[in-house]
Image (cartoon, rainbow, N blue to C red):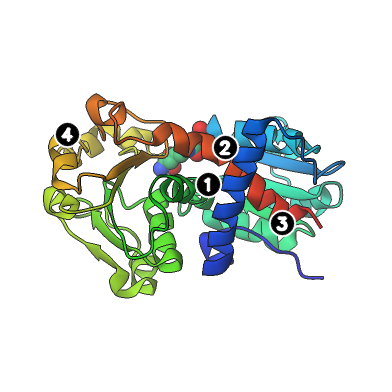
């Protein structure tokens, strides 16, 4: 039996992505009504975190509990993974005992190797290349506020990082235009760009890239694992702050998103982050509902 994994958004079809978004909206309403819905009774999700997390850990753990299942938090410090047990051996053993495995790690190859050796679904909870779970939540937030994103224009401002790569994949699947405003030297990977064709373009000037856009998105300048580059990156990204002047370039009803954690005064001004066009708190809450829709798809059989 072939096992279904979620390592990048490209593991979904366009239809499945939209269905997940609509299901997440439904699950959110059920949760807000206090309705008990437990399709994962007796199921266990192992969660391997090699990097820090607030949202990803809490949303998966709370989601499994609400669904009647259970989640295990595993850090490399406390497991044999941290002492050099081969990934493949760990995946084989873990997957013989649980129903799904979520991993947050550095190299994307780690989740790929883990998935290849696992007999249960593996979910990417963030790697250096991709953060697909965040794009389920972000797109849910857009659909909730503005309806379908097909044909809209989205502007990514900042680093061509894991979040940017996942926005490129979302543009492919949901058919929106993506402008990427990043300083030279911080471009997204060319192969990921190329696969998206002319839906995605790099525009160096962030003010030009923001013009008439429907959604402005940014992320930290130094991602986890790049802490020692913080100062160098602050210089490189100095002109790439999403502030009120940049928001004014966008359409009047444009939204602002950030996966969080955010640094007010760096990649986003406090006025934009806490302003009326910001939907960052909806995005964060949607991690719970969107991943419940994902868990239902992968684990509730
Ligand atoms: N956005 C996000 O993934 O947050 P955490 O790092 O807190 O999980
Ligand atoms: N690009 C950021 C996202 C954090 C959720 C990082 O990888 O640290």
Q: Is residue 246 left or right of residue 259?
A: left
Q: Nearer the viewer, mark 1 or mark 4?
A: 4
Say which residue appears at 12% left-offset and 37% top-offset. Answer: 245
Q: Earlier in the sequence, mark 4 or mark 2?
A: 2
Instruction: Say which mark, if any, is on residue 56.
Output: 2
Of helix, strand and loop, which one carries label 3?
A: helix
Of helix, strand and loop, which one carries label 4?
A: helix
> Does residue 133 appear in this view?
yes
Residue 273 vertical position relative to residue 188 in the rendered view, above or below = above
Instruction: Say which mark, if any, is on residue 42.
Output: none
- Foreground residue, 253 or 207? 253
Say which residue appears at 38% left-offset and 49% top-offset. Answer: 146
Query: Is disc 4 surrounded by few (<14), some (14 to 19) or many (20+) residues within 10 Å?
Result: some
What is the spatial separation of the Cα atoms under label 1 and label 3, in whole angstroms? 18 Å
Of helix, strand and loop, which one carries label 1?
A: loop
Q: Is residue 205 left or right of residue 152?
A: left
Of helix, strand and loop, which one carries label 2?
A: helix
Count the labels in the image: 4
Whether disc 1's CB lies below 8 Å from ligand 1 is answered yes
Query: Is disc 3 surrounded by few (<14), some (14 to 19) or many (20+) residues within 10 Å?
Result: some
- Foreground residue, 261 or 213? 213
Say which residue appears at 53% left-offset and 55% top-offset. Answer: 108
Q: Earlier in the sequence, mark 1 or mark 3?
A: 1
Instruction: Say which mark, if any, is on residue 298.
Output: 3
Residue 111: % across, % down:
61, 55
**Residue under pointer 4:** 244
Whether disc 2's CB lies below 8 Å from ligand 1 is answered yes
């Amino acid at each position: 039996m072939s096992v279904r994994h979620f390592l990048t958004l490209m593991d979904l079809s366009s239809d499945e992505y939209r269905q997940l978004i609509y299901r997440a909206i439904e699950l959110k309403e059920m949760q807000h009504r206090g309705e008990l819905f437990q399709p994962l009774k007796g199921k266990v999700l192992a969660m391997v975190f090699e990097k820090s997390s607030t949202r990803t850990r809490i949303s998966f753990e709370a989601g499994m509990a609400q669904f009647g299942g259970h989640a295990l938090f595993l850090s490399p410090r406390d497991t044999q993974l941290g002492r050099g047990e081969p990934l493949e051996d760990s995946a084989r053993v873990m997957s013989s005992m649980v129903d799904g495995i979520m991993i947050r790690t550095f190299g994307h190859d780690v989740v790929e190797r883990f998935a290849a050796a696992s007999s249960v679904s593996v979910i990417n909870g963030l790697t250096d290349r991709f953060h697909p779970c965040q794009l389920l939540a972000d797109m849910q937030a857009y659909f909730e506020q503005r309806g379908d994103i097909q044909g809209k224009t989205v502007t990514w401002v900042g680093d061509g990082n894991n979040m940017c790569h996942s926005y490129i994949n979302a543009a492919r699947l949901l058919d929106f235009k993506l402008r990427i405003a990043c300083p030279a030297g911080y471009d997204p990977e060319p192969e990921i760009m190329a696969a998206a064709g002319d839906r995605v373009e790099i525009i160096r000037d962030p003010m030009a890239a923001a013009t008439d856009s429907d959604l402005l998105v940014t992320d930290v300048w130094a991602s986890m694992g790049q802490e020692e580059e913080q100062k160098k990156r602050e210089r490189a990204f100095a002109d790439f702050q999403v502030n009120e002047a940049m928001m004014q370039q966008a359409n009047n009803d444009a939204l602002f998103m950030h996966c969080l954690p955010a640094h007010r005064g760096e990649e986003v001004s406090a006025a934009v982050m806490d302003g009326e066009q910001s939907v960052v708190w909806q995005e964060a809450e949607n991690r719970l509902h969107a991943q419940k829709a994902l868990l239902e798809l992968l684990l509730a059989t």
